[in-house]
Amino acid sequence: MGLRAFFKRHFGSSEPLEPLGFELSVGASPESLTDPVELIVKNDATTPMEFVVQILREYLQQEKSAAIQTMLHVHTEGEYPVAILERPQAEQLISRIRIEAEKRDFPLAAEARPL
């Protein structure tokens, strides 16, 4: 199976995520934020890679190829900063990620780290 077929098979479709319920400001410069933090996603041995890609695409508006690259960084490095956000947004997003992961019995974890 080629790489394209692998990703199509494994990252094609998943159960939809619940909407965030708030507007997420992704891509703002840290200097323009009042209380900026890095959103860190942590790797584990159980959460499927396609779920991590889905989180990145649906909640952080990453393009598919960027989400796959980010997921691979999380997977190979153990954890990886995926966004810079205002602390309240990061905390809400971490809560939503936890809820969505728990619904599927995945241990995916994320945390906010001050810059």
Image (spheres, rainbow, N blue to C red):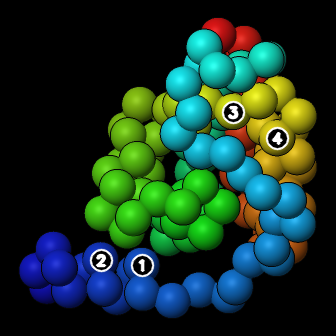
Q: Secondary structure at mark 4?
A: helix
Which residue was labeled with disc 2? 7
- The alpha-carbon separation of the residues under discs 2 and 3 comes to 29 Å
Which residue was labeled with disc 3? 85
- At horizontal 70% and vertical 85% (from top left) the residue drawn is 16
Give the position of the C terminus as an image quadrant: top right
Q: Earlier in the sequence, mark 4 or mark 1?
A: 1
Q: Which mark is residue 11?
A: 1
Give the position of the N terminus as an image quadrant: bottom left
| Disc 3 packing (10 Å; few <14; some 14–19; many ≥20) | many
- At horizontal 80% and vertical 73% (from top left) the residue drawn is 19
- The alpha-carbon separation of the residues under discs 3 and 1 comes to 26 Å
Q: Secondary structure at mark 1?
A: helix
Evaluate if marks 2 and 1 touch, with contact meaning CB atoms under 8 Å apart: yes
Mark 2 or 3: in front is 3
Disc 2 residue type (three-letter)? Phe
| Disc 4 packing (10 Å; few <14; some 14–19; many ≥20) | many
Evaluate if marks 3 and 4 touch, with contact meaning CB atoms under 8 Å apart: yes
Evaluate if marks 4 and 2 touch, with contact meaning CB atoms under 8 Å apart: no
Residue 12 visible: yes
Q: Secondary structure at mark 2?
A: helix
Nearest the camera: 10 or 81?
Answer: 81
